[in-house]
Amino acid sequence: LASQSHLHHQTIVNVSEKVAFGGKELVIIGGPCTVESLEQMETVAQKLSAAPVQALRGGVYKPRTSPYAFQGMGEEGLEILARVRSHYNIPVVTEVMSISQIEAIATHADMLQVGSRNMQNFDLLKALGQAGKPILLKRGLAATIEEFVMAAEYILSHGNPNVVLCERGIRSFDDYTRNVLDLAAVAALKQITHLPVIVDPSHAVGKRELVAPVAKAAVACGADGLIIECHPEPEKSVSDARQALSLEDMVDLVDSLRLVAAAV
Ligand code: PEP
Ligand code: MN
């Protein structure tokens, strides 16, 4: 179902009346790694909706490496997302970690993210086939392109045609960057599937000063969109502080990304 030979067209995934992945327009999702407070999300939404960034991100259920690290605001965070979503009329994307969270997240968010750590959580993928909302599927930490496409296939074959693939870097021997961004995978996925493909430069590089150049390269090689972490006070982010852009840098980056998109 995911392969290009199955459908000879580009799938368009709508997340709201105005925002669609896979069309002519580059779609940029921005926001913090983690939802921390209503004030934080109001500040982010106000600044980014004017940029304009087309969708907001913010984790409320967080897959943290350490069980002692902050695990996210949970339902309270979902309510914060729901408030900024309606106040700024902007779609929101947030991560779903388990089947039991699907219903509540699908009520408040416009798109459900499957994180790298859950790319092969097959029961979750099957359940998301029935979620009734678009899915942002991130590539697994060490997943091959074939495994990535087959993970999408689980969601598609269980009834949900609205899947957006996200390349976010894979594990390799060099840890200078947090992961190694596989831009060739973006080009390959665009050729072998009909699904929209976006890039997460933030988790790929892990260092804020590397986010902008890598984001531009992603657009130049055909990505349909980007998901980028930013924060009103980047150094104070409760998670992924090292890779968070300031809101000002995010707005500047969005401007230059549109110029790159217009040129390709
Ligand atoms: C995230 O987007 O916040 C995240 C945890 O990303 P990944 O699953 O790619 O590590
Ligand atoms: Mn993060």
Image (cartoon, rainbow, N blue to C red):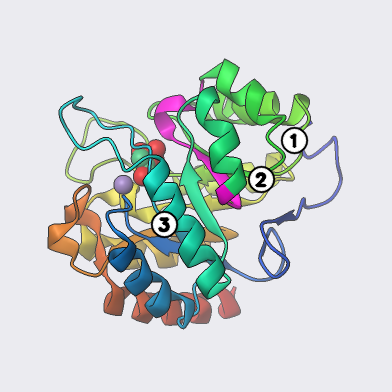
Tell me the mark number nearer the camera, choosing from 2 and 3: 3
How many angstroms separate mark 1 from mark 2 (CA)? Answer: 8 Å
Residues marked 1 and 2 touching at CB (< 8 Å): yes
Please say whether residue 178 is one of the residues in the magenta stretch. no
The percent position of residue 206, horizontal first and vertical second, equals 24, 50
Residue drawn at x 60%, y 25% is: 125
Tag 2 secondary structure: loop
Residue 80 image label: 3
The answer for how far apart the CA atoms under marks 2 and 3 are is: 20 Å
Task: Residue type at mark 1: give it.
Answer: Asn
In the image, what residue occupies the spot 38% across and 47% down? 76
Q: Position of residue 116 (x, y in %)?
A: 42, 33
Tag of residue 44: none
Label 2 neighbourhood size at 10 Å, few (<14), some (14-19), many (20+)?
many
**Which is in the foreground here, disc 3 or disc 1?**
3
Write down which quadrant ligand 1 falls in: top left
Characterize the local packing of mark 3: few (<14), some (14-19) or many (20 or more) Cα atoms within 10 angstroms: many
Q: Position of residue 211 (x, y in %)?
A: 30, 61
Whole-percent x, y for residue 93 in the image: 51, 52
Res 176 → quadrant: top left
Q: Is residue 59 visible?
A: no
Mark 1 vs 2, N-terminal side: 2
Residue at (30%, 74%) from the top-left corner?
A: 247
Closer to the camera, 153 or 37?
Answer: 37
Q: Is residue 224 left or right of residue 98?
A: right
Question: Does 60 sit left or right of 193 as displayed?
Answer: left
- Quarter containing the C terminus: bottom right
Q: Which residue type carries mark 2?
A: Pro
Q: What span is colored magenta in the figure? A: 108-120
The residue tagged 1 is: 160
Tell me the kind of residue under disc 3: Ile
Name the residue that disc number 2 marks. Answer: 134
